Amino acid sequence: MEDTLRQCETKPIKGETKFCATSLESMLGFTQAIFGINTKFKVLSTTHFTESTARLQNYTILENPQEISAPKIVACHTMPYPYAIFYCHYQESESKVFKVLLDGENEEKVEAVAVCHMDTSRWSPEHVSFRVLGIEPGSSPVCHFFPADNLVWIPIFPS
């Protein structure tokens, strides 16, 4: 809980707008503030097509990831706390959104949402992604899959 409070109270990095939402209404209000009050938008999340008891397993990508065109995205991550808190944020730097069809070791099919941050130059050098990937801030895009309880909001425009 301390880490959740600390993350919600920490000043955002340059070019980032963040908000800890404690209700669906506040999450929608934050998203509308980023996209514009009259902009229509939709939410994406990772979908598991089968019930699985496996918490962690290896997955294989079944087909080429499908990029979803989105000039702006708002990402909302669940945070550990006694009640629902979503850490929502928008970064001015370019991000790309993908849908990726995955097959688990137990043949579980998942349509996962992935986000790639194309510019990480403003991120803290201590960010866990840099340690895991063995890279430096700004040297490479960083992509990550979203668990099923995380949300990605994107604006939709008439075609």
Image (cartoon, grey):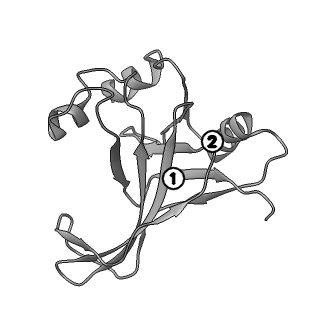
Element carrying mark 1: strand
**Dot in front, 1 or 2:** 1
Q: Residue at x 61, y 51 (%)?
A: 70
Say if 84 sits above or below 18 in the image. below
Name the residue nearer the viewer: 13 or 50.
Answer: 13
Image quadrant holding the N terminus, namely: top left
Name the residue nearer the viewer: 145 or 94.
Answer: 94
Percent across and percent down for residue 134 are 14, 35
Q: Residue at x 16, y 78 (%)?
A: 105
Percent across and percent down for residue 84 are 48, 44
Say if 96 sits above or below 20 in the image. below
The numbered dot on residue 88 is none
**Seen in the image, is 107 located left or right of residue 157?**
left
Q: Quadrant of residue 25?
A: top right
Element carrying mark 2: helix
The numbered dot on residue 27 is 2
Residue type marked 1: Leu
The numbered dot on residue 151 is 1
Of marks 1 and 2, which one's residue comes earlier in the chain? Answer: 2
Q: Count neighbours of disc 2 (C-alpha within 10 A) and say few if under 14, some if 14 to 19, many if 20 or more.
A: many
Q: Are marks 1 and 2 in contact (CB under 8 Å)?
A: yes
